[in-house]
Image (tube, helix red, strand yellow):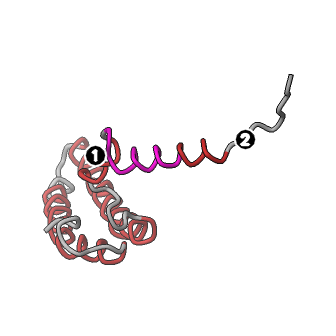
Amino acid sequence: MEAGAGDLDTRAERTKSAMKSMGPTVLAGAATTFGSTAFLAPCVLIFFVKFAYLMCVTIFASICTAMFFFCPLLAFAGPEGNDGDVMSLLGRVKPGGTAAKAAEAEMTDVAKVSTPLLSINA
């Protein structure tokens, strides 16, 4: 289930849903990649040992960044409501959309209120 399809409006609900639905898959992918490269560590050739070290460090740093930095960042400043919804964005961009109507209404309000600061009568 994607976040926009349900009734997940707050950042915390969306982050919790993402962690529930994608967290185990991401962790399993990291574990299998880490495990498969760990078999290269006892090799005799230095290239494979260094490659195993590089891959293990990369996977560890990636999973730590994803779980302990990116997810809290989304919970703090992630999308909320219709933010990130492509159809909502298209409604704002296309001519006659919500934002276009709001901008047009604002321009007519400004035109009604604005008066010249100096009026020179000749």
| Disc 2 to disc 1, C-alpha distance | 35 Å
- Above or below: residue 41 compared with residue 64: above
Residue 108: x and y in percent read: 53, 44
Crowd band around label 1 with a 10 angstrom C-alpha radius: few (<14), some (14–19), many (20+): few
Amino acid type, label 2? Thr
The span picked out in magenta is 95-106
- What secondary structure is marked by label 2? loop
Crowd band around label 2 with a 10 angstrom C-alpha radius: few (<14), some (14–19), many (20+): few
Of residue 9 and residue 29, the one placed in the foreground of this image is 9
Q: Quadrant of the N terminus?
A: bottom left
- The answer to whether 23 appears left or right of 65 in the picture is left
Q: Main secondary structure of the magenta part?
A: helix
The residue singled out by tag 1 in the image is 90
Task: Say which residue appears at 82% left-offset and 32% top-offset.
Answer: 119
Which disc, if any, is residue 115?
2
Task: Say which residue appears at 35% left-offset and 77% top-offset.
Answer: 12
Residue 103: x and y in percent read: 47, 45
* Picture quadrant of residue 75: bottom left
User: Would you say residue 43 sits in the magenta stretch?
Assistant: no
Amino acid type, label 1? Leu
Residue mark closest to the camera, 2 vs 1: 2
* Picture quadrant of residue 13: bottom left
